[in-house]
């Protein structure tokens, strides 16, 4: 009988409205969400999947992106081991993005910034770092949830950061 030694971790995907959180979660999991609610391109349900990734079972949640649902961010963030922060490269760094990065930093967990929609428009890392006031220690990765560009790299980078934090 094989004993399952995989660790369970919770990762939350944050991002402003239309940054691509639902598409990211569906693409990285390879599954369409079973309970997906949307009205006029605004997700009005919770995005959640489980990933079996190397030595981990990842519970992957995505926050609602519309500002009026910001009261849910802290509930979803409770107990998270790491975060993925999606920026919409077609919009650039928005005021909601600045609010979200401040929120994520308060939790003192590893996070990765995924500059999404790189297949449509490239947003340089330097601009993202300057606008969000983040250090070079935070990974900024250009992605496309549609073409799957660098999605695995985002997960790998975050897992490595979580492992490094836990080994200290």
Image (cartoon, rainbow, N blue to C red):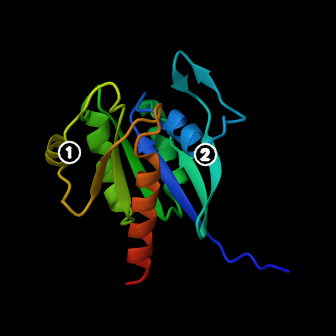
As drawn, 164 above or below 140: below
**Secondary structure state at the residue bearing disc 1:** helix
Using a 10 Å C-alpha cutoff, classify the residue at mark 1 as few (fewer than 14 neighbours), some (14 to 19) or many (20 or more).
Answer: some
Q: Which residue lies most toward the top here?
A: 40
As drawn, 49 above or below 79: above
Residue 124, position as x, y percentages in the image? 19, 39
> For residue 98, what is the image quadrant?
top left
Residue 90, position as x, y percentages in the image? 29, 25
Would residue 59 appear left or right of 167 to someone viewing this image? right
Q: Nearer the viewer, residue 127 or 69?
A: 127
For marks 2 and 1, give the CA distance. 26 Å
Q: Which residue lies most toward the right here?
A: 1
Residue 69, position as x, y percentages in the image? 49, 35
Residue 50, position as x, y percentages in the image? 65, 53
Q: Residue at x 46, y 56 (%)?
A: 155
Report the number of numbered marks.
Answer: 2
As drawn, 2 above or below 73: below
Q: Nearer the viewer, residue 110 or 153?
A: 153
Q: Residue at x 45, y 30 (%)?
A: 66
Q: Residue at x 29, y 31 (%)?
A: 89
Give the residue pinned by disc 2.
29
Q: Quadrant of the C terminus?
A: bottom left
**Residue 165 disc label:** none
> For residue 38, what is the image quadrant?
top right
Q: Nearer the viewer, residue 42 or 160?
A: 160
Using a 10 Å C-alpha cutoff, classify the residue at mark 2 as few (fewer than 14 neighbours), some (14 to 19) or many (20 or more).
Answer: some
**Secondary structure state at the residue bearing disc 2:** helix
Q: Quadrant of the N terminus?
A: bottom right
As drawn, 123 above or below 62: above
Q: Earlier in the sequence, mark 2 or mark 1?
A: 2
Give the residue pinned by disc 1.
125
């Amino acid at each position: 009988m094989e004993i399952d030694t995989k660790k369970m971790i919770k990762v939350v995907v944050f991002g402003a409205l239309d940054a691509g959180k639902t598409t990211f979660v569906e693409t990285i999991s390879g599954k369409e969400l079973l309970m997906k609610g949307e009205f006029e391109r605004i997700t009005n349900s919770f995005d959640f999947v489980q990933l079996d990734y190397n030595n981990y079972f990842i519970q992957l949640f995505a926050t609602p992106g519309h500002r009026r649902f910001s009261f849910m961010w802290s509930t979803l963030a409770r107990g998270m081991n790491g975060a993925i922060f999606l920026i919409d490269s077609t919009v650039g760094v928005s005021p909601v993005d600045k609010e979200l990065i401040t929120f994520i930093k308060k939790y003192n967990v590893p996070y990765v910034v995924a500059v999404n929609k790189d297949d449509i428009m490239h947003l340089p890392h330097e601009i993202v770092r300057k606008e969000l006031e983040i250090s070079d220690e935070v990974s900024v990765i250009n992605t496309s949830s549609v073409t799957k560009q660098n999605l695995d790299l985002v997960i790998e980078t975050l897992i490595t950061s979580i492992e490094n934090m836990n080994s200290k």
